[in-house]
């Protein structure tokens, strides 16, 4: 597996892949890889001749500076996992490369990005869509893989790819969960011991027969600071935070209704 710490090195490798005509799968990440990322990398390795993983903590999608500064960094373990799973390339571009325009140019969407997480994280999806557009253009993969845990993000990226005629197929992979139902997330590393015990309540209540308002009430009673519980288009979405000292650890999840 080759690790490219700058884009110049990656462009050379990309040209070589193009010359060989190899199909290319892409898994964009912000590092702190877990079994959810592993399932995306495995899907890419199974479906393509070569797989590239990006590790880039994108500052423009963090509306909360504490969340950015506390974002877990597990680079050595990430590289070992990517290699073990069969990834061929890891790219780790710098801010100056990714945002040579200093974020003057942005992608924004006018409907779906304003609800659910978008209503609680101003500018978040502008940052996500902009960086994903840049990464998709940098990698020029045949297929890119995203987790269903971030279902709103997946829909926005899939529709952006359609709207801008991107040549990369956008694919979603099922959420990977702990045995107690907690959706895997890099932020789970920031939960306190008590928070980790409470966290699966989010998934349990989203799957319950209670209505959205009652679920939000039960979450608050369990100690969550609830952003939203909303059912739409056959899914129930929830976002809520648990405190670890001064740090708010924000968890999101969604389930298919009738599951
Ligand atoms: O889902 C994530 O980890 C990030 O939002 C992504 C897609 C890598 C963009 O920074």
Image (cartoon, rainbow, N blue to C red):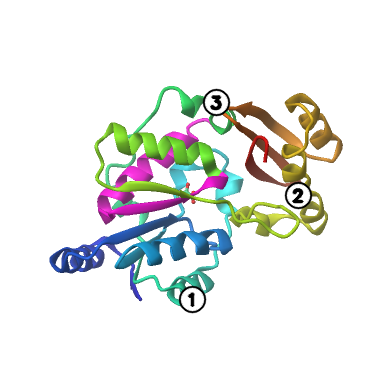
| Mark closer to the chain start, 1 or 2 | 1
* SS type, badge 1: helix
Q: Name the disc covering residue 199, or none.
A: 2
Q: Which residue is mark 1?
A: 80
Is the shortest distance between ligand 1 and the CB of mark 2 under 8 Å?
A: no
| Mark closer to the chain start, 1 or 3 | 1
Task: Answer few, some or many: residues within 10 Å of disc 2's Cα (few below 14, many 20 plus, some between 14 and 19).
Answer: many
| Mark closer to the chain start, 2 or 3 | 3
Distance between the alpha carbons at the discs numbered 1 and 3: 37 Å
Residue 104 shows in the view: no
Q: Name the disc covering residue 115, or none.
A: 3
Task: Answer few, some or many: residues within 10 Å of disc 3's Cα (few below 14, many 20 plus, some between 14 and 19).
Answer: some
Q: Residue furthest right?
A: 221
Magenta-drawn stretch, dominant element (helix, strand or loop): helix
**Number of marks present in the image shown:** 3
Considering the image in quadrants, where does the C terminus appear? top right
Q: Is residue 50 left or right of residue 215?
A: left
x and y percent of residue 250 in the render?
66, 44
Q: Which residues are magenta?
A: 121-149
């Amino acid at each position: 597996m080759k690790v490219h710490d700058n884009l110049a090195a990656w462009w050379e490798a990309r040209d070589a892949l193009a010359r060989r005509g190899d199909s290319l799968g892409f898994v964009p990440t912000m590092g702190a890889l877990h079994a959810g990322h592993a399932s995306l990398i495995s899907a890419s390795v199974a479906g393509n001749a070569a797989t590239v993983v990006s590790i880039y903590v994108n500052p423009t999608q963090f509306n909360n500076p504490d969340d950015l500064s506390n974002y877990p960094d597990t680079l050595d373990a990430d590289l070992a996992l990517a290699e073990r799973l069969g990834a061929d390339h890891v790219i780790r571009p710098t801010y100056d490369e990714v945002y040579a325009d200093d974020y003057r140019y942005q992608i924004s969407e006018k409907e779906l990005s304003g609800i659910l997480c978008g209503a609680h994280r101003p500018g978040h999806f502008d940052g996500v869509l902009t960086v994903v557009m840049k990464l998709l253009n940098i990698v020029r993969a045949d297929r890119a893989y995203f987790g269903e845990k971030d279902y709103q993000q997946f829909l926005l990226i899939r529709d952006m790819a359609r709207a801008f005629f991107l040549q990369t197929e956008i694919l979603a992979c099922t959420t990977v969960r702990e045995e107690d139902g907690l959706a895997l997330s890099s932020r789970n590393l920031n939960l306190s011991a008590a928070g980790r015990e409470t966290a699966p309540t989010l998934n349990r209540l989203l799957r319950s027969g209670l209505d959205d308002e009652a679920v939000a009430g039960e979450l608050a009673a369990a100690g969550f600071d609830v952003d939203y519980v909303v059912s739409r288009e056959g899914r129930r979405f929830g976002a809520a935070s648990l405190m670890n000292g001064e740090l708010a650890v924000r968890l999101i999840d969604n389930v298919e209704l009738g599951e």
